[in-house]
Image: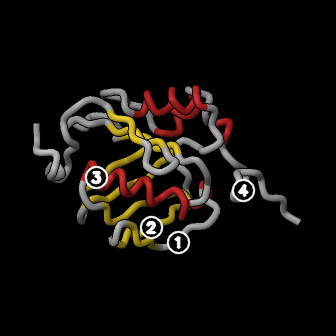
Amino acid sequence: MPDPDFPPPAGFLADGVNESMRPGTALLRLTTTHERRSILDGAWWPRSRNLTAELPGLISALTERLGPITRIGLDSAAWDEMPTRMTIDDRVVHIDVFSVGDDTALVTRGDQDHFSLLVVPPDTPPEAARAAMTEAVRTGNPKQAQQILIDTGTDQTRPSGPTTADGRRREDR
């Protein structure tokens, strides 16, 4: 087993069993094998659509497990506001904004080592969220993120527009 004080080499996750971590108020689950045969490397279930509140916990947990995170790509429709970068744990993390919602977060460690996480919508019922996260980290999972959300009944919670800080739908006036 690799030394836990050092991140695994580029392209790999540390060996071990699936781990669940609670970074701040978000739940993160990673597939922790060197093989990376699945489409997804893990799943993240944020508590809100407030990226400035959710991202620091995720990045801290990922940095602890994978090493320094330099960039994250997210779907602009899934978040209320999106800065272009944030300083987290004294490191600048660049935030790429994608307008095509594919229900994932693309995490970059170093210059070009990418990890793909299923992003479970924050208002998902716990049972559906757990099912989606379990499927995302299943060894050899061939499903795309969107299909996992559909199959687990999670997709029906997708927002149709921006929300307030407490997760309620904003009304356009």
The three-letter amino acid code for the residue at tag 4 is Thr
Residue 100 is at least partly visible in this image? yes
Mark 2 vs mark 4, CA separation in Å: 20 Å
Whether tag 3 and tag 4 are in contact, CB under 8 A, the answer is: no
Q: Are marks 1 and 4 in contact (CB under 8 Å)?
A: no
Q: Position of residue 114 (x, y in %)?
A: 30, 54
From the image, state whether disc 1 or disc 3 is nearer to you. 3
Q: Which mark is residue 95?
A: 2
Q: Residue at x 64, y 62 (%)?
A: 80
Residue 83 disc label: 1
Instruction: Name the N-terminal-most of marks 3 and 2.
Output: 3
- Label 1 neighbourhood size at 10 Å, few (<14), some (14-19), many (20+)? few
**Residue neighbourhood size for the residue with mark 3, other residues' Cα within 10 Å, grouped as few (<14), some (14–19), many (≥20):** some
The first of marks 1 and 3 along the sequence is: 3
Q: Earlier in the sequence, mark 3 or mark 4?
A: 3
Element carrying mark 3: helix
Label 3 vs label 4: CA separation? 31 Å
Q: Amino acid at mark 2?
A: Ile
Number of the label disc, if any, that sits on residue 63: none
- What residue is pinned by disc 3? 64
Q: Position of residue 1 (x, y in %)?
A: 10, 36
Whichever of labels 2 and 4 marks the residue nearer the N terminus, that label is 2
- Asked if disc 2 and disc 1 are in contact, CB closer than 8 Å, the reply is yes
**SS for callout 4:** loop
Classify 73 as above or below 141. below
Q: Nearer the viewer, mark 3 or mark 2?
A: 3
**The residue under label 3 is which amino acid type?**
Glu
Crowding at mark 2 (Cα within 10 Å: few <14, some 14-19, many 20+): some
Q: Which residue is mark 4?
A: 163
